[in-house]
Amino acid sequence: MKKDHNEVWKNCLNIIRDIVPATSFRTWFLPIVPMKLERNVLTIQVPSAFFYEYLEDQFIDILRKTLRKELGADAMLEYSIVMHNDTSAQAKPYTVKMPAKENTNLKSQPVSLPLINDTQIKNPFIIPGIKKVHINPQLNPEYSFKNFVEGDCNRLARSAGYALANNPGKTAFNPLFIYGGTGLGKTHLSQAIGIEVKARYPEKTVLYVPAHKFIQQYQEATRNNTRNDFLHFYQMIDVLIIDDVHEFAGKEKSQDTFFHIFNHLHQTGKQLILTSDRPPVELTGLSKRLISRFKWGLSADLQSPDFQTRIAILKQKIYSNGIELSDEVIEYIAANIDTHVRELEGALVTLMAQSTFNKKNITLDLAKKIIDKIAKQTKREITIDYIQKVVCDYFDMNVDVLQSKTRKREIVQARQIAMYFSKNLTNSSLSTIGSQIGGKDHATVLHAYKTVNNLVETNKEFRSYIGDIEKKLKFY
């Protein structure tokens, strides 16, 4: 008896529903439409190339196993991807075949991308027959400026990003180098710029690529002897966004290729946006000539959000989810989750889930129980602000004094100790530490760190100070 494609996909969904989180199931599987089933090849339609890429990256193992369960070991999956181009409102489907077997290359083979001059360049994003202006930018529509909450912690980077989105490649912010710790919004902001550029200049080709994916594509191009095609493809881009460029460390050939791409784009007035977990001056494992180019434009850091910004972030998330929370609940969350945006949003999601599953209203008591539990299960991150407070309490001085320009010996020493512990106990860059402790540069922080180390080794009384402060910090 011939199987029906709707029935096969329904059976697959029944299995997948029990494996993936409910939110992921609703977001990534319910929009899929089964189209046809021919000779054990199931064709499913997905809304976009980005949707297809995400399924392939995150859920391919689940899709493979469930499909094999329904159709056998020789099952195949075919995607019909709806493409919305810039010149027509009509969606155009295309297909990519992908084997659902174990131990096979799950990505389709590179295909040719025609150019105006009739030369053939292979597109590493495997989008068949799409002209230059129709290359999928790989942007998440949720990462827009509208959804990015501005505060003192990110104002410079956001303002610069918005300015260059109005005039890409024509401002002094080229490249725009955005840096900061995990979960502070680097990916969100860089993609927001790309989304804004596409909204204002639909004809421009925007592309977002994580550095690790760029490296993988380059390695594949090397194996396939298509490095020139790879180089030419990236030189066509008008606005290139490379996320986590610190991952280029140690990848000399990938660095060399990116160096040539960078030069070509910069010289031809195209825009580059780069993100990293540290500023250019602190990058290691990268060539000096590449680091020097990262410094050509503007380097802007993202810091941990302050209390008011955390409240604003929570209120925006609450509004977008269509729920209501009292101000006291919002303030409690903001006061107790003070590390980064991702953890703040995660705490809110956990609170909403507990409320939904247990059918309870989100009261302050419920918030306290859940947030306190999260805080106990997760080691709290020591912040630069907290280190400054502990150091100032120990020496009986006001935190504002550390921010002043005074050169009094006791103030300078306290400032150096705060910098020392900030380097040892946080993931912040030297530039970030300096900016938060007296508005100093990275060289001052490095000097302070060396000074404290030397005093610990040579001065018994000073070593006692450091030991006492360290004990206080460890009880945090």
Image (spheres, rainbow, N blue to C red):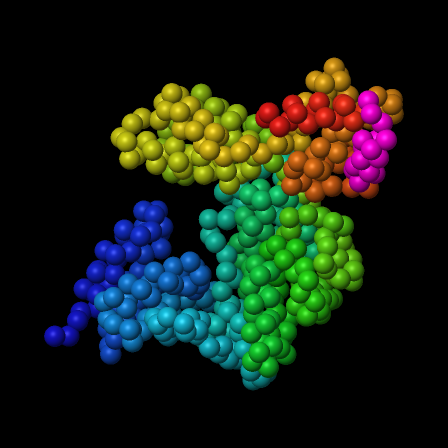
The answer to which quarter of the image holds residue 396 is top right
Q: Closer to the camera, 426 or 300? A: 426
Query: Residue at coordinates 66% horizontally, 55% vertically from top-left?
Result: 246
The answer to which quarter of the image holds residue 239 is bottom right
The answer to which quarter of the image holds residue 66 is bottom left
User: Left or right: where does residue 271 sit relative to residue 41?
Assistant: right
In the image, residue 309 sits, relative to residue 253, either above or below, namely: above
Q: Which residue, as the protein is rendered here, is positioned at the far left?
A: 1
From the image, which quarter does the C terminus lie in?
Answer: top right
Q: Closer to the camera, 284 or 258? A: 284
Magenta portion: prevailing SS class? helix
The percent coordinates of residue 218 (x first, y second) are 60, 71
User: Left or right: where does residue 476 sit relative to residue 39?
Assistant: right
Query: Residue at coordinates 25% horizontally, 72% vertically from top-left?
Result: 72
In the image, residue 85 sits, relative to residue 342, either above or below, namely: below
The percent coordinates of residue 237 (x first, y second) are 60, 67
Q: Is residue 460 magenta?
A: yes
Q: Closer to the camera, 210 or 374? A: 374
The percent coordinates of residue 136 (x first, y second) are 49, 65
Q: Closer to the camera, 427 or 89? A: 427
- Which residues are drawn in magenta? 445-461
Q: Is residue 417 visible?
A: yes
Q: Is residue 450 magenta?
A: yes
Query: Residue at coordinates 71% horizontally, 38% vertically from top-left?
Result: 423
In the image, residue 16 sits, relative to residue 256, either above or below, namely: above
Q: Which residue, as the protein is rendered here, is positioned at the far top?
A: 396
Q: Is residue 45 visible?
A: no
